[in-house]
Image: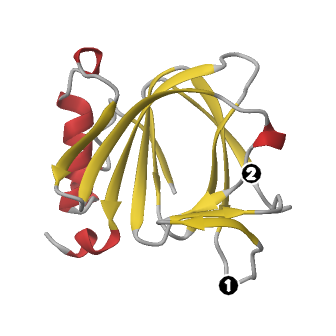
Amino acid sequence: MILQTLDSTLLDSSYPEAIKKALSYLRNTNFSSLEDGEYELDGRDVYARIFRLENREMKDSHPEYHDEYIDIQYWLSGTALMGWLARRSMDYELFSAEGDLFLLKDDPAEERFIEVRKGDYMILFPSDIHRPDIKTGESDKCRKVVIKVRVNKLKEN
């Protein structure tokens, strides 16, 4: 997991091309003029979802992970808590598995929480279990961009 602000370019040169492309899209797109929806950057290998959401109570959420895609989550507005823990070879009881979304049934004891706000982005790999969009008490609503990057695109430069 990488947490950074979009105005920082310090790590950019070390990222694979697919992640550089995603960050360039985030930096160079006027999201206020874009409708919520899905936008392809490189077919289904790299695509963006723009949406508004209402943050949830902890009890109404589930930790999740993905195997095929990396998430780059970027906050256009609002504040939220993100749960995170390293995915290990332990057995997780799945609540649901649909497409590339695996939801855990139980709350892992070693989960940590990070506050994210407008301008932050988080890169979440298949090795990262995360719980997005938890209420902070500060803000219930967010607008986000989630860019999905197919894992095998990281090998291309």
Dot 2: element = strand
Question: Which of the two residues, 138 or 65, is positioned nearer the viewer here?
Answer: 65
Q: Looking at this view, is 91 or 1 the one in front?
A: 91
Residue 12 position, x and y percent, is 26, 49
Q: Is residue 93 left or right of residue 7?
A: right
Q: Which mark is residue 61?
A: none
Q: Specify the quadrant that holds the C terminus.
A: bottom left
Which label sits on residue 112? 2
Q: Amino acid at mark 2?
A: Arg
Crowd class of label 1 (few under 14; some 14 to 19; many from 20; radius 10 Å) = few
Instruction: Tell me where residue 120 appears, x and y as whole percent.
Output: 46, 33
Indicate whether 111 appears above or below 24. Answer: below
The residue under the point 41% across, 61% down is: 70
Residue located beneath label 1 in the image: 89
Taking the image as shown, residue 91 lies to the left or right of residue 13, namely right
Which residue is at 83% across, 62% downward? 106
Q: Residue at x 48, y 66 (%)?
A: 100
In the picture, residue 44 is in which quadrant?
bottom left
Along the line of sight, the residue nearer the viewer: 133 or 51: 51
Asked if residue 9 is positioned above or below residue 154 in the image, the reply reads above
Q: Residues within 10 Å of mark 2 (few under 14, many from 20)?
A: some
134 in relation to 97, above or below? above
Q: Mark 2 against mark 1, which lies toward the viewer?
A: 1
In the image, residue 60 sits, relative to residue 16, either above or below, namely above
Residue 153 horizontal/vertical position (percent): 24, 69
